[in-house]
Each structure stands twice: as structure tokens, then as C-alpha cells.
Image (tube, helix red, strand yellow):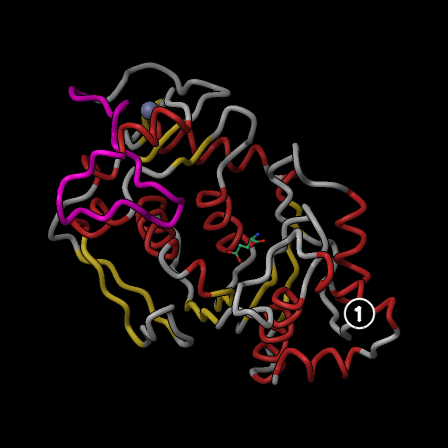
Amino acid sequence: MFRTRFAPSPTGPLHLGHAYSAILAYDMAAAAAGQFLLRIEDIDTSRAREHWETQIYDDLSWLGLQWPIPVMRQSERTSVYSEALSRLWDMGALYPCTCSRRDIFEAASAPQEGVPVHGPDGLIYPSTCRPTGPATEGPRPIAATLRLNVQTLLVPDEQFSFKETGSGPEGQTGIIRFSGRQVMAEIGDVVLARQSMAAAYHLAVVLDDAAQGVSHVVRGQDLFEATKIHVVLQRLLGLPTPIYHHHRLIRDESGKRLAKRDDARAISAFRLEGLTATELLEKIMS
Ligand code: GLU
Ligand code: ZN
């Protein structure tokens, strides 16, 4: 079954970029006589708000989209995330990290020459807390920051790939190949669990896409590099890798990409101004 999804976080209003992403996923599913799913990524309970979730439903309905209910909500899936974290912990794939943002900034400020500094989550983690000996024994620490130990998990020459039917920020398309070595150097030990969250985005997204049977992940190019870590996690957890379709980002007049806080371009603002959904679509597609 050809299945796409739109997976917004209810932490602010949806803007034109979200509308583009949702409509593209919807149209691709319709063209393939498939299914379009909605998923509410409310895993960060400190930032998710019910009124934003309500507004997501209102905005998407106004755009003319429909989706099956009940809608998957990450806040209801904590046991699934917890079980996966325990599995990864038992594999020796995770280690606890106690670094503050500042610690990471300071340790990453003296990079070796030619080594990239930024990965999909910002600064590449300088591995301060990575255990030097064998992985920590005993049960998984709860309410701790846990990182994926890519250095010991992956073999440098190990090959990974995914199929891209859209394009990455540099026009990457077709079969995208990358090695364990690249993951170590360009992505590093990403966070999979946080003190205050059931799971971090990278883990939740691969578990959710697999649970929903998503065959085609349609999303913005800003997540193209993160896809590599998703493919690694799919291999570790024995989950299928969907086809990915990354799309261009919608930018404002000055070329800046739209952000959540950019309320002026919120779908609801256009809706309240009296624009029709069709007029809004013309605005985005042009
Ligand atoms: N929840 C993410 C966001 O709002 C989308 C994640 C994804 O599409 O993989 O940007
Ligand atoms: Zn650390």
C-alpha cells in the first residue's frame, strides 16, 4: 500500500511550508490510490499544546485534506519508545550523556582540521561521555539523556542506502548511499532519549513510520541529512526503510525559510483574512 503521512508537532501554528508538505503528501497518496495519514508529534510535552493540535485539524480540513481516525499521537506511545530504548540499551548501543549545551559547545570548538562541525542536530557531539571500555552493564537508566554509540556500533565500510524520489538540499536524488564512516564523521552520537521526554525525535519517527506502515515519507529538505540516522536505526531495530521524498522549503520574500514563530505566514492568518484554500495553494505553488 502506498502510504504517506504528515507529522506536525503541535508547538505553534502551521505555516505555508507545512501546507505545502501536507498537500504534497496528500496528492502523492491520491495519485497512487494510496492512503494519507496524519500523526501528531507531541512527544515534547513541555512544548506541545492541545489548542495547537486543534488548530492543525482545522487548518488541514480547511485545506481540503482528509485522513483516517484515530490519529496517531506520540504522547500515547511512550511504552513503544521505552521498549525500543531498552532493546538498544541491551545491545550496548546507547550510553548516558551528562553534557550541558555549553560543555558540547566548548568541546566542539576545537575541531580537528577537515572534520565537519555540524550535523543534523547542530554541533556534532564531541563524544565526551562515550564509554571507552565495554558498554555499561545493568538496566537502562530512566530519565537520562542517552546517545547512540555510532562509533562502536557501525563498521566504517558498512554500506547504507535509501531511495530518494524528491531531492536533498544539493540536488541529491535516486539511490543515496553512505557508509558507517560517514555517519560517524557527519552525524555522530545523536540523542535518542532525553531526561524529560519518552524518546527523542529520531527514534520516535522511525518507530512511528514503521508502525503506521508508511511507504513514502514526504517532508522538507531540512530533514534530508537526518534520514541517514533514521536508516541506521531502521537497520538496528529490524524495521523496513521507506522511500523518502524530500521537498524544497518554502521561503519568505527575503529567502529565509519559514519558522514556527512566523505567525504572519500561519495558515490560520490567511484563513482569517478571508483567503480561500485555492488562493493559498496558488501562493505556495508559485
Ligand atoms: N514533526 C516534525 C516537524 O514538525 C516532522 C518530522 C518528519 O516529517 O519526519 O518538523
Ligand atoms: Zn556527554
Question: Does residue 8 lie above or below 75 as drawn?
Answer: below
Residue 114 location, x and y as percent? 14, 49
**Does 116 lie within the magenta span?**
yes
Write the start and end of the magenta stretch as one range.
Answer: 109-134
**Does 153 lie within the magenta span?**
no
Q: How many marks?
A: 1
Q: Residue at x 70, y 80 (%)?
A: 281
Q: Quadrant of residue 25?
A: bottom right
Q: Amino acid at mark 1?
A: Phe
Q: Residue at x 67, y 56 (%)?
A: 262
Cβ of disc 1 within 8 Å of ligand 1? no
Q: Quadrant of residue 274?
A: bottom right
Q: Quadrant of the C terminus?
A: bottom right
Residue 46 location, x and y as percent? 65, 32
Judged from this view, the residue extending furthest toward the top is 138
Question: Does residue 4 lie above or below 143 as drawn?
Answer: below
Q: Residue at x 80, y 64 (%)?
A: 269
Residue 175 location, x and y as percent? 28, 72
Residue 15 location, x and y as percent? 68, 63
Q: Quadrant of residue 236?
A: top left
Disc 1 target residue: 270
Left or right of 50 in this view: 207: left
Question: Does residue 144 lie above or below 175 as drawn?
Answer: above
Q: Main secondary structure of the magenta part?
A: loop
- 180 and 52: which is toward the camera: 52
Mark 1 closeness class: few <14, some 14–19, many ≥20 residues within 10 Å = some
Q: Residue at x 51, y 24 (%)?
A: 195
Left or right of 172 in this view: 83: right
Left or right of 177 in this view: 104: right
Q: Secondary structure at mark 1?
A: helix
Ligand 1 rendered quadrant = bottom right
- 244 and 119: which is toward the camera: 119
